[in-house]
Structures are given as structure tokens and as C-alpha cells.
Amino acid sequence: MSDRQTAAPRIRRADYLGAAGAFAVCMAGTTLPTPLYGLYQEQIGFSELTVTVVYAVYAFGVISVLLVAGDVSDTVGRRPVLLCGLGLAALSALCFLLEGGLPLLYLGRLLSGLSAGLFTGAATAYVMELAPPGREARAAFAATAANMGGLGCGPLLSGILAQYAPRPLQTPFLVHLALVAVSFAVTWLLPETVRDARPASAVRPRRPSLPPEVRPVFVPAGIAAFVGFSLFGVFTSVAPAFLAQSLDVHNHAVVGLIVFCAFFASTLGQLLAGRLGVARALPAGCLVLVAGLALLAASLAWQTLPPLVLSAVVGGFGQGLSFRGSVAAVAGAAPEAHRAGAISSLFVVAYTGISIPVIGVGVLTEPLGLADAGLVFIGCMAPLAACAGGYLLRRPAVTGA
């Protein structure tokens, strides 16, 4: 850790857990609307294409932050960036609470994406920097669990509340606002870890960069990240509609639980990837992703629930393996001075995967139907993952770390 990011002496043993909790709350807000899209369709009246566009607006928000301000917390400090991210998360929840039609849904998703874009890099670094000596491994696990666990808990929480609590379109966001308020207070009390933090006027936007030595590993790693995030994009945008229309599953809690399983499996995959090493985790993750896509295809073709649940677990596990392997491979290949930019470039590719392919499914839903549109998506993604996995089996990625 550099001198300018050495933790202050007043750090307490549990501080990193407080930062991880705020991280989880922010990420939960990004997936909170997942089980509710069907209710919004009934109330406002819009097509499946609109659902996918509303969903993808979130990715555009994340990408815009990564492109222009991905490393802003290195300049102004971690706490101000996280407090700003929590403020944006609160504004996003308010947009959904107001229920003013599509414009507010779009705005809410955009604000949620901006919040996640600020949190993704800054909160991960913050959790690691707040860890006292001897707890670095626990902090790494806390950051991983907060990110993916928060994403999984969002639909689980809103699904349960929408199914069993009154006011299904308001209660989840009221609960999230309360959690954001608590997280804001906790973050406010945490110490700053960037010692020579400067004012916001010192920030200079820098686009992510990709050094030449990273490019050979970046292509297969980027493909793996793209496919894995695309699978999650489909699960969190159109899977609820497929469950309702084709499988006659209208229980919002069940929808939330299935999506939660995908993110929980991803967390397990990321943990196992650390033990396997990049050379094995990255190609293995690609091939497991193919298996998850095949199970999703079986569910769409036969219109049965068990393969869909299995695809959530298997696909999520493959995404976790491949994504952590991708990050480690790119980080290891990049020179230290360009490492943050290279990783930001990988995240841009990954978040593109939850926008363009997902919108493509929405476009195809009108002429083909939801199931056939999903099969076209799988027919495009599975060969990409298989090719990336095959390439990495022949030329394993080796990190310099």
C-alpha cells in the first residue's frame, strides 16, 4: 500500500465491516427493482423492450462513471465518493417511490448506475485499506461478498416485501432508504484512508487505458466478463417475465430467490477462483458459463422451472470463476502505473454486457416471443464463451502478481 493511501492510526478492527455493509446496501439498491418490473408493466403499460431499456440505463450510468471518473476517489478520498454514491442511491429510491411513469423509472435507474459506478472501485479499495494487519484476507472476502451479495440480496428483499408486505411498489424502496440512511451515518464516522486527499477541483477525467502488454490476455478475459455479465443481465431483466408468462410463476419472492441464487453462486465462484489460480479459474469459468447457458436454453425450450434454477446456480458460479479470473489476469499483466486503467477498461466491457445484449433480447421479443429471443441470445453468447475458454486452455493467462 502506498504512503498516500496508508490507513490512519485511528482505524478500528471492525471499520472494514462498516464499509462493506455500506457497499452491500448500495449494490442491493441496483437490483431492487428486478422482481417489480411486471408490476410496473401492469401499472404503466409498456413492452418487454422497454423493460430491457430501463434495465440497461443502469449500465450506461456505470459505464459513464468508469469512463470519466473511475479513479476519482484516489484524488478526493474514499469517504466523499462513497457518501456521494449513497446520496445518489437515495435519489434513485425516491424516483421509484414517486412512481411518475417511465421518465422517473429511467432517471431512477440512471442514478442507481452512477451510484454503483462510484462505489465499485472506491468501496473495494476502502474495505481493503480499512483492514487491520492480519485481516487482509477477511477484508478481501468482505469486499467480494458485499459486492455480489448485495446484488443478490436486492431482488430477494424486494421480492419478499412485494409479495408479503403492503404497498409492493413502495415498501422495498422505503426499506432501502432506511438502510441507505444508516449506511450514510456509518460511512460518515469511518476514517479516511487517502491521506493527502485534494478538493474536487483537482480531479482530471482520465479515460481507461490499455497498455500493449495487456492486450493478448484482455481479449479472452473481456469476452468472459462480457458473457458472464450478459447472463446476469438476462436473469435480472427478462427472467421475471419468462417466469410469469411461460412458467406461470407469479410469486415475487420466488423470482427474487432465483435471482439471488445466481449472485450467491457467483460469490462462491469468486472465492474458489482464488484457490484455483488464474490459469485454471478463467478457462474453467468460461466452460461452466457455457453449461449455465445450456441449462437456460433447456428451460426456455421446454418451458420448465428446474433447468432455470440450475442455470442460475451453474451460470452464476461460472460467472464468478471467470470474472475474478479476468480481473486477476488483466491486473497481473498490466504495469502498476496502468493497472487501474486496465481494470476499468475490463469493467466497461463487462457492463456493456448488461446493456447491448439485453436490449437485443428486448428487440427480438416482439417478433419472436420471449423464449425464442432468449434462445437467440444464448446462440450468440455460448460460442463466445466456448471460444474464450478453448483459447485460454491452450494459452493460459499468467499474472505478474
Image (spheres, helix red, strand yellow):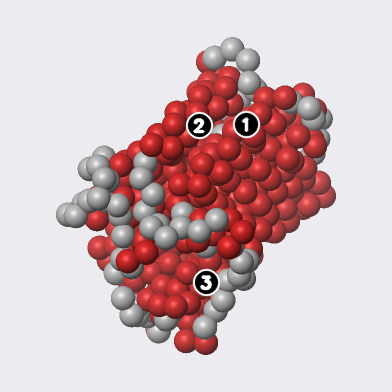
Q: Residue at x 40, y 84 (%)?
A: 395
* Nearer to us in this view, 259 or 346: 346
Residue wearing tag 1: 93
In the picture provided, is 317 more to the left or to the right than 151? left
Q: Which residue is mark 3?
A: 341
Residue most toward the bottom?
212
Depth-wise, is mark 2 or mark 1 nearer the camera?
A: 2
Question: Which quarter of the rendered picture does the N terminus lie within?
Answer: bottom left
Count up the numbered dots: 3
Mark-to-mark CA distance, 2 and 3: 29 Å
Element marked by disc 1: helix
Q: Earlier in the sequence, mark 1 or mark 3?
A: 1
Whether residues under marks 2 and 1 lie with C-beta atoms below 8 angstroms apart, the answer is: yes
Q: Is residue 324 above or below residue 158?
A: below
**Residue kind at label 1, given as amino acid type:** Ala
Residue 159 position within the rendered picture, expressed as x and y whole percent measured from the top left: 54, 27
Q: x and y percent of residue 42 in the render? A: 76, 25
Can residue 103 be seen in the rendering of this structure?
yes
Callout 2 amino acid: Val
- Could you say whether the residue bearing mark 3 is in a helix, strand or loop? helix
Q: Position of residue 400 (x, y in %)?
A: 33, 80
The mark that comes first in sequence, 2 or 3, is: 2
